[in-house]
Amino acid sequence: VNLNILHAMLSLSPSLLPLLFVCFYSDILPQPPTITHQSPKDYIIDPRENIIIHCEAKGKPHPSFSWTRNGTHFDIDQEPNIIMRPNSGTLVVDISGEKAEHYEGVYQCTARNEHGTAMSNNIVIRQSRSPLWSKERNEPIVVQEGVSLVLECRPPAGLPPPIIFWMDNNFQRLPQSRRVSQALNGDLYFSNVLKEDSRNDYICYARFPHTQTIQQKQPITVKVLNLDAINETMAALYNDTDLFSDDRKPSFLIPSGPSSSKMVLRGQVLEMECIAEGLPTPEISWTKVSGDLPAKRTSFLHYQKTLRIVNVLESDAGEYRCTARNRLGSVHHTIRVTVNASPYWISGPPRNLVLAPRETGVLTCRASGIPKPTITWAMNGIPIENSPKDLSRKVEDDTVIFTDVQTGSSAVYQCNVSNEYGYLLSNAFVNVLSEPPRVLTPANKVYQVIRNHRALIDCSSFGSPIPKITWFKDSRSSTLDGDPYILHDNGTLEVHVAQAHNSGKYTCVARNTLGIYENHVYLEVKEPTRILKQPEYKVVQRGRSVTFECKVKHDSTLIPTMTWLKDDGELPDDERFIVDSDSLTINDVVENDEGVYTCIMNTTLDHDSASAELTVVGMSNLLDPLERPDPPTDLELTDPRERSVQLTWTPGDEHNSPIQKFLIQYEDSLHFRGVWHNLTEVPGTKTTARLKLSPYVHYTFRVLAINAVGISHPSFPSRMYKTNPAAPDENPAGVQGFGTASDNLVITWKPLTGLQANGPGLQYKVMWRQKEVDEEWASETVANVSQFVVSGTPTFVPYELKVQALNEYGAGPEPAVAHGHSGEDLPVAAPENVLVMVVNSTLAEVHWDPVPVKAIRGHLKGYKVYYGRERSLHKHNPHHEEKHIMTFSGNHSHGMLPGLHPFSLYSFHVRVFNGKGEGPPSPSQQFETPEGVPGAPSSLIITNPNLDSLTLEWAAPHDRNGRLTGYVLRYQPVNNSNELGPVKELALPANETSITLPNLKYSTRYKFYLNAKTVRGAGPAISQEAVTIMDEDVGEGTSAVASRQVDIATQGWFIGLMCAIALLILILLIICFIQRNKGGKYPVKEKEDAHTDPEFQPMKDDDCTFGEYSDNEDHKPLKGSRTPSNGTVKRDDSDDSLVGYGEGGDGQFNEDGSFIGQYSGKSTSRDTAEGHESSEAPSPINAMISLNSFV
């Protein structure tokens, strides 16, 4: 049980862990004494009973006790009438042999053991006294009607003071009123006497609470003379003149004079009274001249004559004014209240320290009082200045600092805080312990939690030094210190949302310098309990049976318990109710079975519930259809009160569906005529409701009934009920203060509605004062508006604001204080100590000192850095300026400037800005960015294409970003499948802008990449493609578009056009072969076979025709062509192809399809293009080969 308590306490505050361990292991750990119970400082005893002076303490070993009396040692053994209880310091004084007053004095208890000494408070023993009233004879008091009267009580002084009250001979309290009341001193005051005040049994009683005795004063007789009779008698003598006036203005009976003073201690009760005489009876009111009365701590007693403030604070000091007023005038009295304070703790008394050797700790005795108290320290009851010197201890006013403590330096320290009004004495021990870690959580404890709920796994531990806690799960592969685990300071491991995979074995390890301790616990995550099928609403005929189903799903390892309730109570003890595992059956249903039935499924970890209603009907009702209920009737208003009225009604026919609830609505014909508002709902079983109302409303009510089918029509309205106006119950919400100019304060609020106004003449009292500067509130009463402007305010200063609602019947409650600021103005200072650090060629970081708050003159919105590129540091780049603004919201002192141009000169300045605008700039500064990589060359053009060379021309990058150190040219061939060949790379000097590349392959497409370089490296490349020409016949005109042909050749329309041309040529070839077959055979095959080179086909010398093929060879292709199926000529297969030969103008087809003409040898000169000079049509074979090569 003790461990369970300890676990609960540890979960509240891990800082208590060392002390709690000492408490629970006090049987085995040494501990200095601690006072656990003592008698009060001011101990008033009953002289008829034995005196018991308490002093209890604990420690290890158990402490011994001794006492002092009036500052000297009190030897208990020498006092036969005093015994000390065993194992205790409590004294029991037998007063049968001596009078109680013999033992009056100042006592102090001391508890000590080998580890220190604890001291009790000074206990002042005083005997209670209830002296008798002195014998006196009270003469009858005769007064005229209308004058004031004071009946003095003056009881004998007792200890403690008696409680005073006035009664008659029949022990009935005398009635009191605004006219007659008892003062704080017990006297009975009459503001004016009436004839009925005449009686002979005004008796003052004094009750002494300690002895429970009552003393009474001799009865006082008062006789009041009738004023009319005196006036009639005297009028006969003085010619019908009234000598005694009926009325007079007020004057104070107590206190006397225009002002007085009063002192009260903090925390006590302040009572001030003003009793006035006058005719008519004056009314008393109170105000605080220097502020507002604390509403929650203030009350008025004795018919407003006494102002009472409980739990007095320093802020209650000031001037209070009471005013007595009747129709003839008024009188004031001012009471100046001073608040002093006996010492009180600011953050609690010093706390015990448990330290390990060589550790550091602090005892703090922080207290206050008025006047400021003095603080003294003692160690083991001896003033600390007289205690043995200890280098590890240092006293600094209210603090004792311990550093590098050693074993054996345990002690009890006393802190005494005192001023002229009292003292505080507190003991705090410093216990130096050296203990290995121990885990207090029971080993192998099993924690169970429902899935998706929070799991807390304890590891309550102790050690000195305080152990460090680490957690492991299952295999202990890593510590549990991140999501989803949270490690609390007290060692508890939290799983915020437990899931099934969080189940398992957890190991808690506690370590300190003296050892290690492990503890194993287990977490089981269970499935939640859920009702899958809820009971449903049932309508059953009387005498039949009904069954409510309640099917539940729950964790299989938890034991469920099903409970059924009827109308939130237990089921009737009736055998007709049969409860099964998942249902409730009611046999032979009767009318009393109607109600709401609830099934509750409980497990040890959670529960779920569901409800359904049962309606019992007769046979005829069961056959009737269910409909909406009829509207209620007979609305009646009764028992009218100031803020409420009783509404009753008669329900309409519910049409077989029970009425579930009634909705009550109201119309306010004074403010919102014709609009009905929902007021409240009541259960369907009730037909009356007490309605809470607002003042100054003309109410009309109506009622609607609701059942399972729907809502009835509204009832006929009730008669109108008008509530009386009253002062507002609330004040405007949303009070804000801001400025629209530098010298004003705009106070806004959300106005009250007409319903909230509670009466006519709604106004607002707007109050404001400068925070922590003004003591008095300035105020202005305005009409029913939503804002007020205060002019002439200082710029941007904080204000406290209040807005109170008023109407013709009074003011609303004390308003809450809101806060705002007067208007902003532009900042008057610039950021100082502005520095810039260049991070790299495109990034710089700017630092500055924040502008002082006073110089901002508004809400700080942030800082703006204005920066611009003045010029590039490269002489070839044009001079231009770029301006940018970087905004840093909030209270920043540095910021980054991204996106800078390398190798450039920048200037910048910083400004602060508020809600009004920007302040002055900081002095402009400049910085240079280092070189960066250059941009891509601005252009790359390929010119002069030849069979084996190309010329490249380029321009320098537009953004050089530094000094160019050269260019890098890379190029590679590209085949017809767009596959890239090997890359060649050239390094070029910075001053070159062109180069001719020799030794290129003819009729080959190349891709070129050109980069510029600085010392920072190469920049991005510009790329271009071009094709070397096929031979001299291509012509010079192709150079201008060399780089474009590749692009055209990859277009879909161009590929389609080429395919169409190829198809036409194929058709022509077929026609030629057909014509040739018709014209006879040519001796080509024999010559073909005789030739040694199958790649070369000779021609006949005489007619330049091919040799003749046989008929069975007609289907074969020309051997020399080696044309693949895709129609292209592979340049890599052989250099001895038709591509290498000129296209002779003499070659042509004969009319029989034979090929006429002569092959020419390989071209020996690339400077001519004879094929373009011939007017003859080109050879289709060569044209096709050329086309295939191009494609």
Image: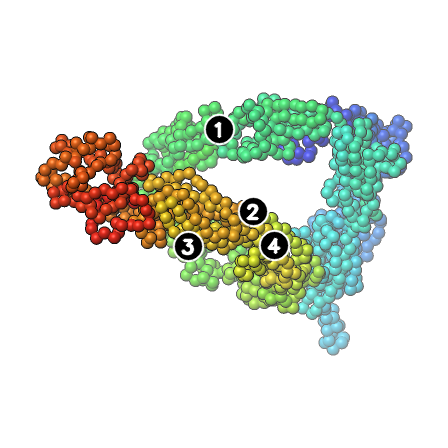
Q: Is residue 1102 left or right of residue 75?
A: left
Q: Quadrant of the N terminus?
A: top right
Quarter of the view holding residue 1067: top left
Tally the marks: 4
Quarter of the view holding residue 514: top right
Query: SS class of the residue under badge 4?
Result: strand
Residue at the spot 90% in from the left edge and 35% down from the top edge:
72
Per the model, the C-alpha gap separating discs 2 and 4 is 16 Å
Nearer to the camera, 1037 or 84: 1037
Badge 3: residue crowd in 10 Å (few <14, some 14–19, many ≥20): many
Per the model, the C-alpha gap separating discs 3 and 2 is 87 Å
Q: Is residue 438 left or right of residue 115?
A: left
Badge 4: residue crowd in 10 Å (few <14, some 14–19, many ≥20): some
Residue under numbered circle 4 = 928
Query: SS class of the residue under badge 3?
Result: strand
The type of residue carrying mark 1 is Ala
